[in-house]
Amino acid sequence: MKIILDQDALFDNNKAASFNRDIFAKSKTVVINVMSSPGAGKTTLLEKTVSALSNEFRIGVIEGDLATERDAERIRAVGAKAIQIETNGICHLDARMVSKALPEFDLDEIDLLFIENVGNLVCPSKFDLGQEHQVVILSIPEGNDKIVKYPVMFRVAELVILNKIDLLPYLDFDIEQAKKDLQGVNPKSEFIQVSSKSDEGMESWFDWIRSLFER
Amino acid sequence: MHEVALMGDILDLIKNDAEKRNIKRVSKVELVVGELSNALPDALEMAFDIFKSRNIEMLQKDAELIIIKEEAKAKCVLCGLEYHPSQHVAVCPECNFPSGELTAGETLKVKSYQGE
Ligand SMILES: Nc1nc2c(ncn2[C@@H]2O[C@H](COP(=O)(O)OP(=O)(O)O)[C@@H](O)[C@H]2O)c(=O)[nH]1
Ligand SMILES: [Mg+2]
Ligand SMILES: [Zn+2]
């Protein structure tokens, strides 16, 4: 017997994602899924962000980047509530993993929740976690070709943050080309350049976050 | 390699449906995989073999996976041209402007399955 199913392969994930989305909507929590390749600077950016904004917003972080407690500890050290998801070597977060972590937070007491995804430019891109916003970080040492090489990831970004611009003098990276590539792949995405090390440009990232609360 | 996780979900979907219809053994699974779905057909095949080798009751030993590939297609909102997108997916080759919208290629779905 042949059964025509015609169903999205991510059906179960998407159900869990809308479950999460309802929870976030009820608690009025702004949720940002942060994705990048390993080492692009997700945790560093979040550390700096928590330090700078914790007097404005009550911030929580779900850490999905590798099954160690290290990233979560770095976030706690700067004063946000952080929960580590044990991904056991898996290459992406899915919505059910996030659902399971949610009871650890009192979301009524959290204005801004970051989800640091697993460092990977392929696998996480299609898994909706129920977040409203998606940010992709690209860093100078990764080189210019990443945007056209991983178009699916860059197409889901609402904002692309180019990190480690303090390294520009030492490395061959063409920012104008990167902007052009992003335009060509995802014309709707915004683009910000920062250094999480020297803090250059960080204020525009913070302003972008603030703007989410005014929408 | 998120294809193993994906295949797990795909087989769960089929299992849920098969149980409702009292289908015990699945002999064929048909997927549509888009060029821009971020799932690789080869990796899905491998994942399917992994699940078969795990001796899941539902899946017949000689079960077959059919993958229908879906090409990426885009259409320009300015001039209406339909094109096969290159590196700059959103750039219309006629207008040379990021005015293209994807119309196909992102699909990842279970089309059908066969079983008794
Ligand atoms: N030079 C420089 N190094 C950075 C910057 N941001 C992060 N790093 C370094 O990059 C490495 C990886 O950062 P991390 O935040 O752990 O990356 P993640 O894997 O994406 O979470 C660390 O050694 C950071 O100190 C930056 O803006 N400039
Ligand atoms: Mg990290
Ligand atoms: Zn056109």
Image (cartoon, coloured by chain):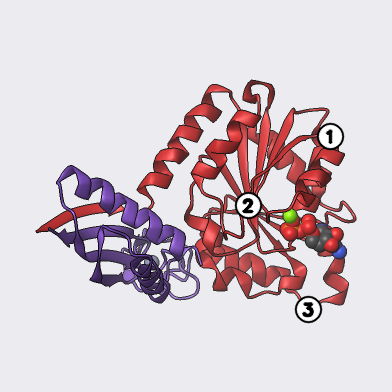
Chain colours: A red, B purple
Front residue of A175/A146: it is A146
How much space separates mark 1 and mark 2, taking CA atoms? 20 Å
Q: Which mark is residue A117?
A: 2
**Chain of the residue where label 2 is placed in the rendered structure:** A
Amino acid beneath label 3 = Asp
Q: Secondary structure at mark 3?
A: loop
Foreground: disc 3 or disc 1: 1
Q: Which residue is mark 3?
A: A172
Asked if marks 2 and 3 fall on the same chain, the answer is yes
Q: Is residue A6 left or right of residue A189?
A: left
- Ligand 3: image quarter: bottom left
Determine crowd level at label 2: few under 14, some 14-19, many 20+ residues with C-alpha closer than 10 A: many
For disc 3, the chain is A
On whether ligand 1 comes within 8 Å of the CB at mark 1, the answer is: no
The quarter of the picture where residue A9 lies is bottom left
Going from N to C along the chain, the mark reached first, 2 or 3, is: 2
Distance (Cα) linking label 3 and label 1:
36 Å
- Report the residue marked by disc 1: A79
Q: Residue at x 83, y 57 (%)?
A: A195
**Ligand 1 within 8 Å, label 3 CB:** no
Q: Contact (CB < 8 A) between labels 3 and 1? A: no
Q: Is residue A97 visible?
A: yes
In the depicted structure, whether residue A46 falls above or below residue A54: below
- The three-letter amino acid code for the residue at tag 2 is Asn
Residue at 86%, 40% (x, y): give it: A77
Residue at 56 percent of width and 72 percent of height: A148
Looking at marks 3 and 1 on the same chain, the residue that comes earlier in the sequence is marked by: 1
- Which mark is first along the chain, 2 or 1? 1
Residue at left offset 68%, top offset 56%? A66
Image-quadrant location for residue B114: bottom left
